[in-house]
Amino acid sequence: MTLLSPGGLVKLVKEAVTRVQQPAMVSTTIFSFSRRHFLQRTAPLLAMPAVLGALQACTPAAPSAGPTGAGKTAPASVAPPIVTQGVDPETLDPHFGESGPIGNVLNNVLEPLVHYDRNMNIVPVLAESWQVQPDQVTWRFKLRQNVKFQNGEPFNADAVKFTVERTMDADLRAKGLNDPFPSRSGVTKVNVVDPSTVDMVLKEPNIVMPVFLTFLYILEPKYYAAKSPQETSVQPVGTGPWRVTDWQKGDHLTLQSYGGYWRGDPGIPEIRFKPVPEQSTRLNMLLAGEADVVGGLLPDDFPTVEGDSKLRISRASGSRRVHLGIPTNVPRYHTRAVRQALLQAIDYDGLAKSLLGPMAPTRRNNVLIAGDAWLNTQIPLVQYNPDAARQALQTAGFPFADKISIYTPAGRYLKDKELATAIAGNLRAIGLNAEAQVLDWTVYTDHMRSDKGLDDLYLLGLGSRFNGPEDASIVTTDQIWDQTHWIQETENGPKFQALYKELLKTSDEAKQKDMVNQLQQLFVEEAVWAPLWLEPAASGVNRRFSWEDSGGGNNLRFWLPGEDPARVTA
């Protein structure tokens, strides 16, 4: 059966593995360890009945490496591309952290069983095919053969079993492991059938199981079993086209090509990531030829970039759900009327116009669900009404004198610090004692992973693939990216959780759409997110580097399924 496309996928291409390189030791500073999901706007695919059948009984051809099968190796004299991002990854161990900066690196080093192509079809990577068994809770995967990890060890069913079981390891969870795969997928155990066949057994049916597999990077068992979390946090070992060889935290991270990669030579010998918090500094680096990729361009930057013949702009439709989260376990925010009043105090249109200008996206009634095809259009927009907000808070006995912090990273999202500061201004305008508090991204995520979590208002952006059931999963139980605690603390929370579980068992398209509409209604009524915007995406790119932003879960991925790798010239 074909996968997600009536025309089928390209034929299986198996690259001969000619040599295996051992990963070099990484030079780095050990640090305490704690998704950018943009995509071109498409109708959601996974929930449609025909597509569901493809997901459940799939024997697709493997993704081609592209017309040439591999990249043409750049001459040694060509300078490596420099890729900037606002912050460093918190960790390079995928089970100890999940964020855009982490994915930007690991999507080039590690590989999952399945992933997205540029058109947002789920396609095979390390799995060649998969099929749900008659019991509806057992998923069988046929694995790609003749694949080697970057340390020379073979990829096989044991590696898949080890990886899944590691996400559930109680001892590692006590040390900070927080991978959400077990709770998202519902996997309870993994059975090795033979070296190239593995079964994953779920607690109950899950119609979006393949979606959650795109987050599951397969790890090399011997290496990860022998090393401490501190060691694996700086030196990942996977099957991907590049490997980490040097990480000087706060300065640069270097990837070098892996010659034993199963798809062939990735073509670019070296790629460097640099963390640069200030957007103006990143732009100046691009203009000076000191950087090749700079994300987060604003309209004011466009004329400068377009006026330089060496540069171009790569655009992708925004899917990052930027919101102000309200922790319902904090007593002063526990009452629904208080949270609704806070949402009324925010000048959504004014913020978007002043900070994003002509890039400001169309305002939405909620940003839990990013895909237009899944949006419940019957939900009204929150109206900006500071007088009504002040009166409602006074009626509720809100402590106006209490200090309110709006936690925000700086450089992680488009205009994040400025946005938090402007929201604080909106709240001060109705008499609240509010201010923005900037946290280093690592500190920010450390707080999220702690037992206490974030204890005040917080600015956050969460990626989306425009699939309603997957979008809704982010605010179910055991998801560290939702710090509102709303499932446990609000009237609608348990109702949402129960309905979501029923959704995962439902294959009928109309019923799915109705359930997702109900989920949005339950969520919006509790006012635990102030819906700000879907973050627009534009990157400045040096013309010598052929990379294009494909969005979705691909992040800064330099070799997509079915394509040639990105290339660099002098």
Image (cartoon, rainbow, N blue to C red):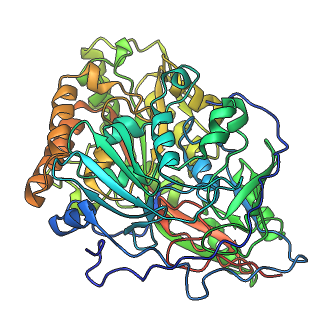
* Residue occupying the point 83% across, 65% down: 290
* Residue occupying the point 54% across, 76% down: 14
Where is residue 207? Give x, y as percent: 23, 52
The foreground one among 360 and 368 is 368
Where is residue 132? Give x, y as percent: 24, 55
Q: Can I make out residue 368 in this image? A: no
Q: Where is residue 51, by image quadrant?
A: bottom left
Q: Is residue 278 above or below residue 283?
A: above
The foreground one among 104 and 490 is 104
Q: Where is residue 394, by image quadrant?
A: top left
Q: Where is residue 560, by image quadrant?
A: bottom right
Q: Say whether residue 133 is left or right of residue 104.
A: left
Q: Is residue 430 above or below residue 358?
A: above
In the rendered view of the protein, which quadrant contains the N terminus?
A: bottom left
Where is residue 322? Give x, y as percent: 44, 46
**Residue found farthest to the right:** 77
Q: Say whether residue 383 is left or right of residue 113.
A: left
In the rendered view of the protein, which quadrant contains the C terminus?
A: bottom right
Q: Is residue 515 above or below residue 44?
A: above
**Residue found farthest to the bottom:** 67
Q: Say whether residue 505 is left or right of residue 244.
A: left
Please count the marks in the image.
Answer: 0
Where is residue 538? Give x, y as percent: 56, 67
The foreground one among 47 and 409 is 47
Q: Can I make out residue 119 in this image? A: yes
